[in-house]
């Protein structure tokens, strides 16, 4: 199966998932409370914290904005074996 057709598997270790989950808990918020503050659905917060792949960048930013953050472009380490 081509890589772009492979099933997308949630990644609880995803840095955004970890950040949102840890900050929500540190602030004593439930997923519902965070969703209300961000203006998104509780289901989205749950999926985000589980690392479900998403292309809804604007919605991710709405959640991160609650904590004074936003998505940005960062350098990613390149594999040493490019062959």
Image (cartoon, rainbow, N blue to C red):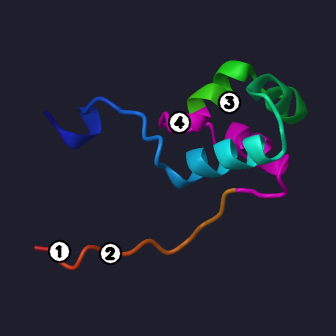
Q: Which residue is mark 3?
A: 45
Q: Secondary structure at mark 2?
A: loop
What's the CA distance linking mark 2 and mark 4? 23 Å
**Image quarter in which the C terminus is found:** bottom left
Find residue 79 and report its horizontal and vertical position in percent: 26, 73
| Sequence-first disc among 1 and 3 | 3
- Label annotation for residue 82: 1
Q: Quick check: 82 above or below 19?
A: below
Q: Is residue 69 magenta?
A: yes
**Front label number (1 vs 3):** 3
Q: Is residue 48 left or right of residue 36?
A: left
Q: In the rendered structure, are the residues bearing label 1 and label 3 in contact, judged by CB atoms less than 8 Å apart?
A: no
| 40 or 18: nearer the viewer | 18
Q: Are there few (<14), some (14-19), or many (20+) residues within 10 Å of tag 1?
A: few
N-term-proximal mark, 2 vs 4: 4
Under circle 4, the secondary element is: loop
Residue at the image position 79 percent from the left and 23 percent from the top: 32
Give the mark nearer the N terminus: 2 vs 3: 3
* Magenta range: 48-70
Q: Please report whichever mark, 4 or 3, sits nearer to the chain's N-terminal start.
A: 3
Q: Residue 78 at x, y = what percent?
A: 32, 75
Q: How far is mark 1 from mark 4, CA to CA?
A: 27 Å
Crowd around label 2: few <14 · some 14–19 · many ≥20 (10 Å): few
Identify residue for label 4.
54
Disc 4 crowd rating (10 Å Cα; few below 14, some 14-19, many 20+) is few
**Residue ID for mark 2:** 78
Q: Are marks 2 and 1 in contact (CB under 8 Å)?
A: yes
Calculate the distance from the C-alpha at mark 4 to the C-alpha at mark 3: 12 Å
């Amino acid at each position: 199966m081509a890589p772009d057709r492979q099933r997308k598997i949630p990644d609880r270790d995803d840095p955004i998932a970890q950040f949102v989950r840890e900050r929500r808990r540190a602030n004593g918020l439930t997923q519902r409370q965070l969703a209300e503050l961000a203006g998104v659905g509780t289901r989205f917060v749950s999926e985000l914290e589980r690392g479900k792949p998403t292309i809804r960048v604007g919605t991710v930013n709405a959640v991160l904005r609650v904590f004074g953050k936003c998505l940005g472009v960062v350098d990613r380490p390149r594999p040493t074996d490019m062959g």
